Image: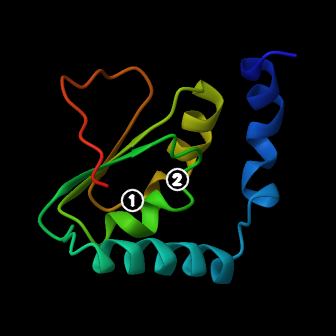
Amino acid sequence: MNQEVSYQNIAPLYDQIYGSDEEHTKNELDALLTLLNKRNIQISNSIVVDLGGGTGRIAFPLSKLCKKLILADLFAQMIEIAKQKQYSCEHGEIVSSRRFSRIILAS
């Protein structure tokens, strides 16, 4: 089974499988923010790209903390579910086919 078929089947259940409850999402977001703070990375005035952001489970709450958030995922099924939930994203963009000239991953 290739990965496309796998994600096509799992996309509708993704949030349930990977933790859709608010406490789990809050814990993951807190862990990410702690890591960013430890590395002295500020996102409040940044455009953040969540690559492989799936259904936006982390991206949507993260969008409230940065200048702009772009949710990108390779799988159209994930993007479709994210678009259905877009009401949660105040200043973001959801893309599946956009290309970026440069992506810098801070380490």
In this rendering, the answer to whether 105 lies above or below 59 is above
Residue in the picture at 74% in, 66% down: 19
Give coordinates of residue 32: x percent, y percent: 45, 71
101 or 96: which is nearer to us? Answer: 101
Secondary structure category for the residue under label 1: loop
Q: Quadrant of the N terminus?
A: top right
> Who comes first in sequence, dot 2 or dot 1?
2
Q: Residues within 10 Å of mark 1 (few under 14, many from 20)?
A: many
Callout 2 touching callout 1 (CB < 8 Å):
yes
**At which x and y percent is residue 31?**
50, 77
Position of the C terminus by quadrant: bottom left
SS label for mark 2? loop
Amino acid type, mark 2: Gly
Q: Pinpoint residue 38: horizontal percent, then vertical percent.
A: 32, 79
| Name of the residue lying farthest toward the left | 45
Q: Would residue 103 be found to the left or right of residue 81 on screen?
A: left
Q: Residues within 10 Å of mark 2 (few under 14, many from 20)?
A: many
Labelled disc at residue 12: none
Q: Which mark is residue 56?
A: 2
Q: In the rendered image, which residue does mark 1 sit on?
A: 89
Of marks 2 and 1, the one in the foreground: 2
